[in-house]
Image (cartoon, helix red, strand yellow):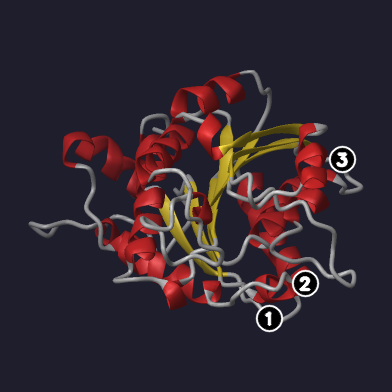
Amino acid sequence: MSADPRLRDFINRKSSEQSRVHLLQFPSDHGILTNNGRPGAAQAPDLIRARLFNLTPHPSYYQKHTDLLEKVYDAGIVPCSENVENDQRLLGMEVAKILGKNRIPIILGGGHETSFGHFLGYVNTGRPVTIINIDSHADVRMLKDEKPHSGSPFRQALEHDSATCKGYHVFGLNPSTVSFPHYNFVKKRGSALYEGEISKEIILNHIEDIEGDLMITMDIDAVNQGEAPGVSAPNPSGIRKDLWLQLAYEFGRNEKVTSFDLCEVNPVYDQDLRTVRLAALTVWYFLLGLSMRIR
């Protein structure tokens, strides 16, 4: 072992036999184009992975952290095309395989179309799930010309014929970017809190009463653009990165959380890889939280 060990020294890239966690990449951003956004998020997963692998295990929790890291399997890339619906179907198949073995998928997006593919994993395994989203947008828009996109995943999940989605809760909304009908649509099916209404304690108390599996998705445009400039839709008033990272850790610790995705990093508009680095640190904190509950 190196005198300066990094996550790459522990994460398994050869066999999934003893794994508890699978790391997947979903380099899609065609859904962003369909949603009239600026492309570039397809470049994010590989950059986030590279930065994540270069981080060190937590020195104060070294044994717990590295014990978990040795159970992480680098599961590779789900290939993406301009057919978002087909790509989501493929992602759903991969997530279902992971969930079917009672392992935890971590998915690096991509645009937020990632999350509907993520959700299809629960559909394919017949496991009801509640979706928790940290985001400045509700992402419950209608399809465009019958095509899914980065703004539609949670309407698709809520309206899916399988009735797999038990509820949808979005925290961190920017009130200037959420329409009145979309806000009410979410409120009738779960809950919605603005960026100025949330804290770690409020969110944790909110999800404490939710029963069953939790699917976590974190859209990095919930973070203030001063701290996360490289996103598909910059947010001048978003939450601070401290709260964002605290939430990632707490989601990792939470026994109800059975899957996680991170979306909307756009390296084309990043500055000194600040947003890529924050995204990698987000996954690092989620893994640290997992290390506190998985043996």
Query: Residue type at mark 1?
Result: Ser
Q: Quadrant of the C terminus?
A: top left
How crowded is the residue under tag 1: few (<14 C-alpha within 10 Å), some, or many (20+)? Answer: few
Relative vertical location of residue 204 with respect to residue 108 in this rendering, above or below:
above
Secondary structure beneath disc 3? Answer: loop
Please name the residue that numbered disc 3 is placed on. Answer: 163
Real-space CA distance between mark 2 and mark 3, rounded to the nearest whole angstrom: 21 Å
Do callouts 2 and 1 mark residues in contact (Cβ within 8 Å)? yes
Residue 127, percent from left and from top: 75, 38
Checking the image for residue 44, the label placed there is none
Do callouts 3 and 1 mark residues in contact (Cβ within 8 Å)? no
Q: Which residue is painted at 75% across and 41% down in the image?
A: 183
Which of pointers 2 and 3 lies earlier in the amino acid sequence?
2
Q: Quadrant of residue 103?
A: top right
Q: Is residue 282 visible?
A: yes
Checking the image for residue 81, the label placed there is 1
Which of pointers 2 and 1 lies earlier in the amino acid sequence?
1
Query: Residue type at mark 3?
Result: Ala
Do callouts 2 and 3 mark residues in contact (Cβ within 8 Å)? no
Residue 86, percent from left and from top: 77, 72
Q: Is residue 166 left or right of residue 39?
A: right
Real-space CA distance between mark 3 and mark 1, rounded to the nearest whole angstrom: 28 Å
Relative vertical location of residue 292 with respect to residue 80 in this rendering, above or below:
above
Checking the image for residue 86, the label placed there is 2
Q: Which residue is painted at 47% across and 23% down in the image?
A: 201
How crowded is the residue under tag 3: few (<14 C-alpha within 10 Å), some, or many (20+)? Answer: some
55 or 294: nearer the viewer: 55
